[in-house]
Amino acid sequence: MRKADFYIRREHLKVQCTLCPHNCRLAEGEFGLCGVRQNKGGILYSHVYERAIATHVDPVEKKPLFHVFPGSKSFSIATVGCNFKCTFCQNHEISQMPRSGRIEGQYLPVAEVIDMAEKYDCKTIACTYTEPTIYFEYAYDIARQASERNIRTVFVSNGFINPKPIRKIAPYLAAANIDLKGWDDTFYRTVCGGELKSVLNALKLMKQLGIFLEVTTLVVTGYVDKESILRDIAKFIANELGVETPWHISRFYPSYKYAQQQPTAVGIIQRAREIGFEEGLRYVYSGNVKGDDGESTFCYSCGEKLISRYGYLIEANKIINSKCPSCGAVIDGIGL
């Protein structure tokens, strides 16, 4: 265990966690909704500091981050736990594990994470798979120390995090892919276990602080597969985050408590991509539709195909010094 950051001590040995917008009030011995932060004797502790449940070397495109060192490797790490309870979660075996009373993982010190990233020639360390917010102390120490060795840290996150933690990690967080899961607060509260407004505020703050953003929307059948919802999301990204923000529209496949639901129709994914362009976004991608033209990066100015992708494989990259070779337009991102 490690003493947690971001909490307030209350009367009678109670504490209030202030890491995420749940702001859990915990009596002695109680865990937060994330299942990994516990009040012991009026002090909040993290049970997942330096306790990894998963480590992999992934293509950075798998995050998905298409505009952060394209074609590079990302050392990916996670602990158990999440501050959401999405009923369609694709990593529910580890994200929801603490809710059954199990906090598993192997001891993996911060320094060893960075050593492994360096050993495997990874440009980035990705805090991913579950929710990096709930292992904030671990992620922060990784990000700060990795920056000293010229390795960038990225988040793949639901964006349900309070402003103070965002401000603390921002100097060491190069990029984030944030799940914008829908545009209906009832959906967020009942299906995901969070709320929309806090996610939107976190996105805007990250943008203001200079964190490079990419946004992913999983088009869950029956909930997010409506044109009006997809258009509202596209408008928010364009107007509040900037037209340079890549939007990944990902095809849903049945999972967890939605195992009987139908996959998203490919036509809906393709139409959502059109909507993104109609709202002025420069880069809109089709996710989980292998072989679709929407996997590739095109110049927003002249239409030239700049990065050809098939799944996570880059077949060709024509970008030179972050510019389109045909018209000279600057292509947004890091390490292009």
Image (spheres, rainbow, N blue to C red):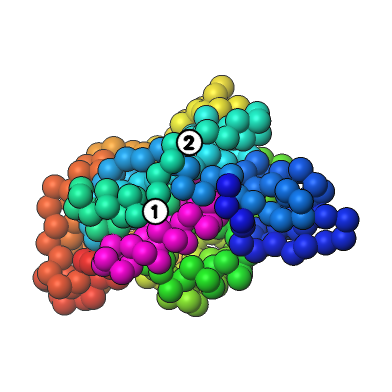
Q: Nearer the viewer, residue 126 or 294?
A: 126
Q: Secondary structure at mark 1?
A: helix
Up the image or down, 255 lies above or below 68; here it is: above
Query: Residue 122 at what x, y percent from top left?
Result: 24, 53
The residue identified by callout 2 is: 105
| Rendered residue at 54%/45% (across/down) | 48
Q: Residue 183, image x and y in percent?
A: 62, 54
Is 27 above or below relative to 171? above
Q: Quick one: 3 or 62, which is closer to the camera?
A: 3
Say what amino acid the circle numbered 1 marks. Val
User: Quick one: label 1 or label 2, which is nearer the N terminus?
Assistant: 2
The quadrant holding residue 6 is bottom right
Magenta span of residues = 130-157
Q: Position of residue 215 (x, y in %)?
A: 45, 57
Left/right of residue 177 with respect to residue 72 in the rendered view:
right
Circle 1 sits on which residue? 110
Task: Report the front residue among 160 and 295.
Answer: 160
Horizontal side of 30 relative to 233 (left or right) equals: right
